[in-house]
Amino acid sequence: MFQLVAGDWVLSKNDGTEQERKIVAQIKHEDFSKTTFENDIALLKVDHPFHFNEYVGPVALPTQGQVTEGFCNVTGWGTTEFLGSQSDILQVVTIPVISDEKCRKYYYGENDVADSMICAGFPEGGKDSCQGDSGGPMVCNGYVAGIVSWGKGCGNPNYPGVLTEIAFFVEWIKEHIN
């Protein structure tokens, strides 16, 4: 059985801030595509609630269809370079959201960027999510705007990271948590 850990910062040591919960149910999007990564979203139900404190807290959902712009923070324990080793310490990168139009031009002919996806990264590359960050959050202005999904390498020029856009799935989330 899998478990969910909140409040962790350094993977190799127990700081006493961690809260572990057993996952008792997974709700995967019924239209998820392993080929295109459309609908790359799932919900996890844990055996009992987390206790909010200075290390563990909630993050707001956007409204259905909310447009995300500006700079956002992506966090994860993924590699810090393509084919590198996993980070032991939680990493954060601040990157700009790229318009759907620009993102589709960057990936034209290679991958489809669906309306349910959001792109983030610098056109010149250098900063991005990477292997091991998939499933991690992109937080913008206090709400979770995206979930790391896919990309071409890590930090490559003109290939921003592609994330599942939460604003596209708010009604689906609400339907499945009630």
Image: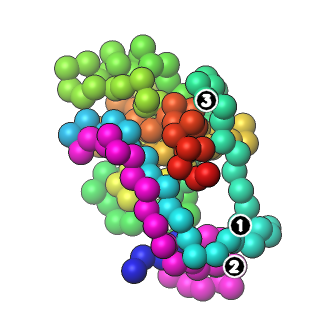
**Residue 161 seen:** no
Left or right, residue 144 beside residue 169: right
Query: Main SS of the magenta segment?
Result: loop
Q: Secondary structure at mark 3?
A: loop
Q: Quadrant of residue 33?
A: top left
Q: Which mark is residue 95?
A: none
The three-letter code of the residue at mark 3 reads Gln
Circle 1 crowding by C-alpha within 10 Å: few under 14, some 14–19, many from 20: some
Query: Which residue is label 3 attached to?
Result: 64
Left or right, residue 87 beside residue 16: left
Q: Which mark is residue 56?
A: 1
The three-letter code of the residue at mark 2 reads Thr
Which sits in the foreground, 41 or 73?
41
Image coordinates for residue 118, horizontal then vertical, percent: 47, 30
Marks 3 and 1: in contact by CB < 8 Å? Answer: no
127 above or below 26?
above
Task: Name the residue: 33% across, 36% down.
Answer: 38
Query: Which residue is label 2 attached to?
Result: 17
Image coordinates for residue 11, horizontal then vertical, percent: 51, 76
Circle 3 crowding by C-alpha within 10 Å: few under 14, some 14–19, many from 20: few
Task: Name the residue: 60% across, 85% down.
Answer: 14
Q: Secondary structure at mark 2?
A: loop
**Mark toward the viewer: 3 or 2:** 3
**Residue 123 seen:** yes
